Image: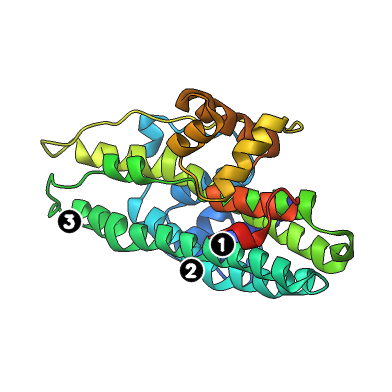
Amino acid sequence: MKMSELVEANFHLLGILSRLGIRGSFSDHSVEEICARYSIDADTFILICSVYSGRDVKPTEDQLRHVRLEDLLLYLHSSHEYYLNSALAKLAPSIEDMIRPTQPVRQKVFRQFFEDYCAELEKHFAYEENTVIPYIRQLLDDTAHAGYSIAKFREAHSNIEESLSDLKNLIMQSMPPECDGEPRIEVLSNIFHLQEDLRHHTYIEDDILVPLVELYERRTPGFGRPARTEDLEEDRNELSDREKEVLVLVARGFLNKEIADKLNISINTVITHRKNITRKIGIKTTPGLTVYAILNGLVDINTIE
């Protein structure tokens, strides 16, 4: 297949080419020829492109053995730089334009939520850049020790889409009418694009990188093979009065035990209510729930510590 035909089939792959250092004109060269020109393994490149093309990629162990780990690390590192230095940088001014017509207190709440998300993303990628990637490079050089394993990465691998999903839902559900317009559409378009990109990125880490590194670890005694976790799909419904009571207390900083005592219910009931709240409004993080409560008039910002 010609590289130009591949891009024509899915123009989003242009960003992936750029992250792998592939630029310029393709002429009539094939995918394999272009990969050879830039010293990129064709099998690895095609696997990454397959993920971004929406295919249900479940690589077998034999397919993983044909992946060049160095090229996968290049993609991950370049993606981190893209998210922090390009995607978020593009999103920030659009958010400011969107919230400008609102009251200062709403601007402050929304701006703080976005800044917290940026800080969360920076921390997430810093762990991968400073701990995970160096460990994998040591593994490639046969200098890694059993004090760390890719199992720890899997356990610590948080869902970086959750807060972004909360941001999207807050914009769609809780922004006042004066925020409707081009800036809001631009913000939502950028968020949807970033969310999709991050979903593919996370998939590559969880379902390609981790199993591949585990293959390398098998060569060294002392490394284990961790179990996988699954994400839950959420639907949306109206909150009950009790769920609103719980949400208000969560927004005010009460812990589950304190909420249970205050409402004279069990901790398990509180946990169930919190799960239902998340299931119904699609917002999972405590900061996101707090902003949701403020924007929907369930709690006064002055009561938030």
Q: Position of residue 4 (x, y in %)?
A: 68, 59
Q: Quadrant of residue 92?
A: bottom right
Residue at image coords 46%, 38%:
258
Q: Position of residue 51 (x, y in %)?
A: 56, 43
**Residue type beneath disc 1:** Leu
Nearest to viewer (mark 2 / mark 3): 2
Q: Is residue 81 left or right of residue 279?
A: left
**Residue type beneath disc 3:** Asp
Tell me, yes or no, if residue 2 can be seen here.
Answer: no
Q: Which mark is residue 141?
A: 3
> Circle 1 is placed at which residue position?
17
Q: Residues within 10 Å of mark 3 (few under 14, many from 20)?
A: few
Residue at image coords 75%, 57%:
188
**Residue type beneath disc 2:** Glu
Q: Position of residue 212 (x, y in %)?
A: 33, 40
Q: Which mark is residue 81?
A: 2
Q: Position of residue 287 (x, y in %)?
A: 56, 53
